[in-house]
Image: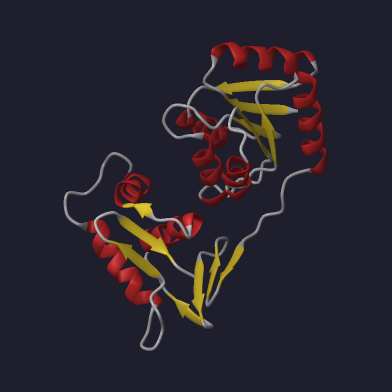
Amino acid sequence: MRVLLLEDSLALAGAVSDYLEARGCAVDLAFHGQAFLDLARDARFDIYVLDVAVPGIDGLEVCERLRTQMRDDTPVIFLTARDTLQDKKAGFARGADDYLVKPFEMEELFFRLQAIAARGRRPQVSTQVLGELVLDHGAGTVLRNSRRIRLHELQLRVLKILVARSPLMVERAVLEKELWGDNVPDSDSLRTHIYRLRNALTITGERELIETVHGKGWRFVE
């Protein structure tokens, strides 16, 4: 197995890496979220192991980006000290295949990795049905009540981000970071794109699908 591990503890990352490599695995390490995503884009791995509490982009966000933005079907196991039912629910909701709580036995981690890898990659789900809306990630198309909706590329990205977080709100700063990185336009471009997206998604008699949370951000409402 080729494993990519996200873990900010040098001691634990080294211990996990040494153990897995002794069992025949090849292990690459990332100590913060962006480094992990960069490695995942550049090479193919059999399985990802993610801590949640890491610097920068946390493990939950990393998993969500793998699934929604990168369309990455590599199996994911969370390896974290967060042990409540809600923590586990959040992990699986973001796209995890397994969840192991720290402290743990190295042998159990290895057996879980073997089991997940044996099942193979998760099937790609290209089409999402969201009430009246059908979003095809593969084709990049959007339908509402069988009506084809034509969206600018950036508007489609906004929709995908809101859908991925639904029913949670996405803050303005988060959306801007996702769309433009550190080069956010000076003008009110985001508000303009959301206004146009709303107009494209809704015709007379239809309800709004994008809700404004005043002074904070927006959410997609099925």
Residue at position x 70%, y 12% in the image: 18
Q: Residue furthest bottom?
A: 205
Q: Is residue 45 left or right of residue 173?
A: right
Q: Is residue 191 left or right of residue 112?
A: left
Q: Residue furthest left?
A: 187
Residue at position x 68%, y 17% in the image: 16
* Quadrant of the rendering where the N terminus is positioned: top right
Q: Quadrant of residue 120?
A: top right
Q: Is residue 74 above or below residue 191?
A: above
Q: Quadrant of residue 10?
A: top right
Q: Quadrant of residue 17?
A: top right
Q: How many marks?
A: 0
Residue at position x 57%, y 45% in the image: 90
Residue at position x 58%, y 44% in the image: 86
Q: Is residue 144 above or below residue 183?
A: below
Q: Is residue 107 above or below residue 96?
A: above
| Residue 6 position in % (x across, y down) | 57, 27
**53 or 151: nearer the eye?**
53
**5 or 150: nearer the eye?**
5
Q: Is residue 111 left or right of residue 199?
A: right
| Residue 14 position in % (x across, y down) | 62, 12
| Residue 112 position in % (x across, y down) | 78, 32
Q: How is the image coloured?
A: secondary structure
Q: Is residue 143 left or right of residue 189?
A: right
| Residue 147 position in % (x across, y down) | 49, 82
